[in-house]
Image (spheres, rainbow, N blue to C red):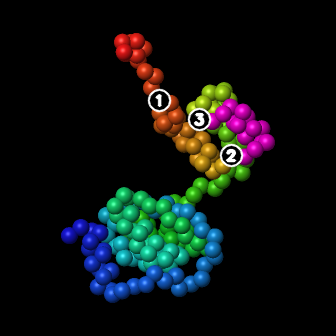
Amino acid sequence: MSMNSDLRARLERLGPVRDAAPDRLLSGELVPILLRRTGAFRDRITVARRLRESGLSLRAAHAAVTRLARDDWTICDIPADGSIEELAHDLAPLDVAVSRSQAVVASASTFLTAVRERHGLSQRAFAAALGIDVRTLQNWEQGRNRPDAAVLSLAALFDRNPRLVLDATFAPAPDAALAGAS
């Protein structure tokens, strides 16, 4: 019997359960969190209960635990007042690490300029590496416009692993010898 069917069987023994909202009322603002398996992950029911206490519906908690078991990670939204720090503390002994979304950079222009300069790139080369127009980058760096969170995440990824971003942005050029032979 697989771990997932064991969880399903244990839940079925509890009888039918409706997907009710959590007992305590939490705010409507949701915060995405990343859950990662760090070990054997045996006590899935307790993890699901704890996620429910943090504001997830029973259905959402079950889906999160199922994906966590299958893929070793999942992203779910909990209410902003669901106490991420307490959740992280409670889930750590259950072989689950909790990470929250990184705070949006206060000064995107300073951040982007610092990443570009740290890698010794011109604005044109950095824009090409990120797959964006150079004028757009210039507007961001000069504070005329603000990039969205996805661009800031891509820049942070580039800062940590430029090769990964470059491999995703650029495709190998066809071999000239092979192209001429066709």
The reply to whether residue 106 is in sight is yes
Mark 3 to mark 2 CA distance (whole Å): 13 Å
- The kind of residue on which mark 3 rests is Gly
Residue drawn where x is 44% and y is 75% of the image: 59
**Residue 72 coordinates in the image, percent (x, y):** 37, 58
Question: Which residue is the site of mark 1?
Answer: 171
Over which residues does the magenta segment extend? 132-146
Residue drawn where x is 43% and y is 84% of the image: 18
Location of residue 58 with respect to 77 vertically, above or below: below
Question: Which residue is the site of mark 3?
Answer: 131
The quadrant where residue 103 appears: bottom right
The quadrant where residue 155 appears: top right
Q: Are marks 2 and 1 in contact (CB under 8 Å)?
A: no
If you read the primary sequence from the N terminus, does the residue marked by circle 3 or circle 2 appear first?
A: 3
Q: Secondary structure at mark 1?
A: loop
- The kind of residue on which mark 2 rests is Pro
**Residue 139 coordinates in the image, percent (x, y):** 75, 38
Question: Which residue is the site of mark 2?
Answer: 147
**Residue 82 coordinates in the image, percent (x, y):** 57, 74
Left or right? Give the position of 41 relative to 34: left
- The kind of residue on which mark 1 rests is Ala
User: Mark 3 Cα within 10 Å, few/some/many (few <14, many 20+)?
Assistant: some
Location of residue 100 with respect to 181 vertically, above or below: below
Depth check, front residue: 20 or 114 = 20
User: Mark 2 Cα within 10 Å, few/some/many (few <14, many 20+)?
Assistant: some
If you read the primary sequence from the N terminus, does the residue marked by circle 3 or circle 1 appear first?
A: 3
Depth check, front residue: 116 or 21 = 21
